[in-house]
């Protein structure tokens, strides 16, 4: 059996977290959710993650903290999403190395994003 790729969602939004984890489950994929980078730090260092889905609207999480917590030895794709009106935050995330998109685009293409990053290799 092939090794299962795991995604990590960092978002304090319980409704949106439910949407992401529910969509992943329906596709037979696995996404674990955390409120902030600090509580996700051990998971980030585990070496088991294929991608991180990062909510730029999370008040207690910063994209800078996320990249600082990630192991350099195992590159992990980061998909950051946030309000389309917060251009500065989206640009900061992109400059840090994340793939960025408005929250509406992330929500509407979620199944494709999950399949692309967590689907069978």
Image (tube, rainbow, N blue to C red):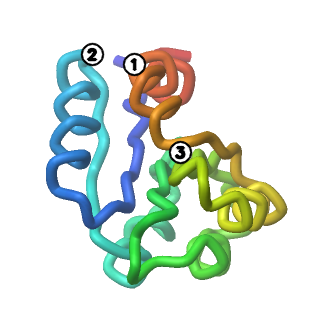
Residue 46, by quadrant, is: bottom left
Residue found 70% across the figure and 58% down from its top = 87
Q: Is residue 40 left or right of residue 89?
A: left
Residue found 66% across the figure and 78% down from its top = 64
Q: Tell me the SS state at disc 2.
A: loop
- Is there a contact, CB below 8 Å, between mark 1 and mark 2? yes
Q: Tell me the SS state at disc 1.
A: helix
Residue found 27% across the figure and 51% down from its top = 32
Residue 3, by quadrant, is: top left
Residue 100, by quadrant, is: top right
Q: Nearer the viewer, residue 85 or 5?
A: 85
The answer to whether residue 96 is above or below residue 68 is above
Q: Position of residue 110 (x, y in %)?
A: 42, 26
Packing grade of label 3 (10 A; few <14, some 14-19, many >=20) is many
Estimate the spatial distance between the alpha carbons at disc 1 and disc 2, rounded to whole Å. 8 Å
Q: Position of residue 63 (x, y in %)?
A: 61, 71
Q: Is residue 85 left or right of residue 25?
A: right
Q: Position of residue 107 (x, y in %)?
A: 40, 31
Can I make out residue 42 in this image? no
Q: Which residue is mark 1?
A: 111
Residue found 55% across the figure and 20% down from its top = 116
Q: Which residue is mark 2?
A: 27
- 1 or 3: tag closer to the N-terminus: 3
């Amino acid at each position: 059996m092939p090794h299962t790729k795991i995604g990590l969602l960092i978002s304090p939004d319980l409704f949106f977290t439910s949407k992401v984890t529910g969509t992943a489950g329906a596709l037979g994929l696995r996404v674990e959710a955390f409120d902030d980078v600090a509580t996700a730090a051990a998971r980030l260092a585990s070496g088991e993650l294929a991608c991180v889905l990062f909510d730029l609207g999370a008040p207690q999480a910063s994209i800078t903290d996320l990249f600082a917590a990630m192991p350099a030895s195992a590159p992990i794709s980061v998909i950051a999403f946030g309000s389309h009106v917060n251009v500065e935050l989206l640009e900061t995330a992109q400059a840090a190395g994340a793939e960025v998109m408005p929250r509406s685009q992330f929500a509407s293409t979620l199944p494709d994003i999950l399949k692309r990053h967590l689907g069978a290799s």
